[in-house]
Amino acid sequence: MAKNAAKSLRKIDEHSVPLFWPLAVAYAMEEAELALFKKNLKFLAETEKVELGLTPQFATANAATLDLHTLRLREFGDAGSSAIPTFVDAPYAGHTATIADYHKGQSLVETLLANGHRRVLVTDWKSAGPDMRDYDIDNYLAELNVCIDDAGGRVNLVGLCQGGWMSAMYAARYPEKVSTLVLAGSPIDTQAGDGPLKQMVNGMPASFYEELVQAGGGLMRGRFMLEGWKAMHPEAQYVDKYLRLYEHIDDPDYVSKTEAFERWYENPIDLPGRWYLQAVNELFRENRLAKGQFIGLGRRLSLGDIRCPVYLLAGDADDITPKEQVFAAENLVGTPKTEIAKALAPGGHVGLFMGERTLRERWPEIARWILRHEDGIGRA
């Protein structure tokens, strides 16, 4: 085999220049070796693409109806509908809001629209620039309020992860504007359970987070957080996902879904330093929201002021927001127990918002629950 390859290479003198080396190697290979060579090249090209060549995008057609300092408000479905809109407060924790509309056939927005919700709004949070370094949680609550007023002044509010604690704050501050409240993977009692995020926040000194913000020029840089998340599961992030991609490199559906995830995951956004430190200290270290001690837009917020129907969704393997942190809301809100629903979905944190099984088994049920309860009284 080696002699044949050498003989073949000698036949093509023009391939002695580097530009033609891949062609020369391919020319000298047997069919099986050539197939492997092509697969390797395809894998390398795809790896470079998913790491460097993709940007986040929404899967479903939409319009940006408001452009504010902190976000663009995305509208999906029937803009002219008179129904109470369903307002998805997407996570603002280092990644973009496209997780709420992840991939065609695998989208929370698409699921809501397919189950009777005629108008869906999503907060498309912006990456913070240097001029936003001193923005705090009040800045975001205020612009959330502008969006909801512009949408008609009353919404079915769906909070995902960090968007959940912000939604709970909003519902406590403006209870008359929230028809129903869904909290999915939302850390409400941040000292409940015993997840790794709680251990990290409690175990590191405040100066650690302050130094990160200082290193980011007054911002919490998304790339810092991304490295932290990857460090929680290094084998999965640095080895396993590449092995799976190589194994499925000739499967267009798998590659498409991989690209959709990496568009979101590998493109983190920056957070205002003041906002980030406020969240770390007041919400996670001091647990002020659960204790009724958080000041939002000039008022002490009590979750007991929330009396609308509430749905709580947690993941049984969620190591970002353990189920105890989500389900603790049941005993903190003022909603009658008969108007509180809970569900435990299989899988981890991100799967609560874009996992195929949860979108198929849990979110249609939640979508119908919202429509039954949006007048404040459950209907059979």
Image (cartoon, rainbow, N blue to C red):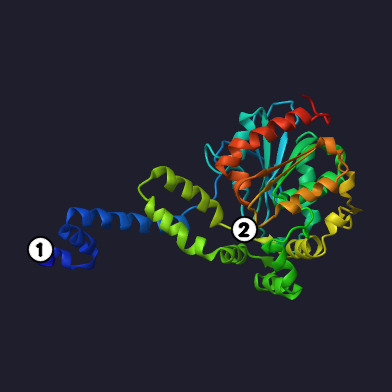
Left or right of residue 244, residue 24 in this image: left
> Residue type at mark 1?
Asn
Q: Where, by quadrant of the figure, is residue 32 drawn?
A: bottom left
Badge number at residue 182: none
Distance of label 2 from label 1 (alpha carbons): 53 Å
Badge number at residue 4: 1
Residue 164 x/y as whole percent: 74, 48
Residue 214 x/y as whole percent: 69, 73
Question: Secondary structure beneath disc 2?
Answer: loop
Looking at the image, which is closer to me, 86 or 37?
37
Q: Earlier in the sequence, mark 2 or mark 1?
A: 1
Residue 4 x/y as whole percent: 10, 63
**Image point (56%, 44%), residue name:** 102
Residue bearing the label numbered 2: 269
Is residue 69 at all visible to an observer of this figure? no
Residue 9 x/y as whole percent: 13, 64
Q: Nearer the viewer, mark 2 or mark 1?
A: 1
Is residue 375 at all visible to an observer of this figure? yes
State which quarter of the image contains the C terminus: top right
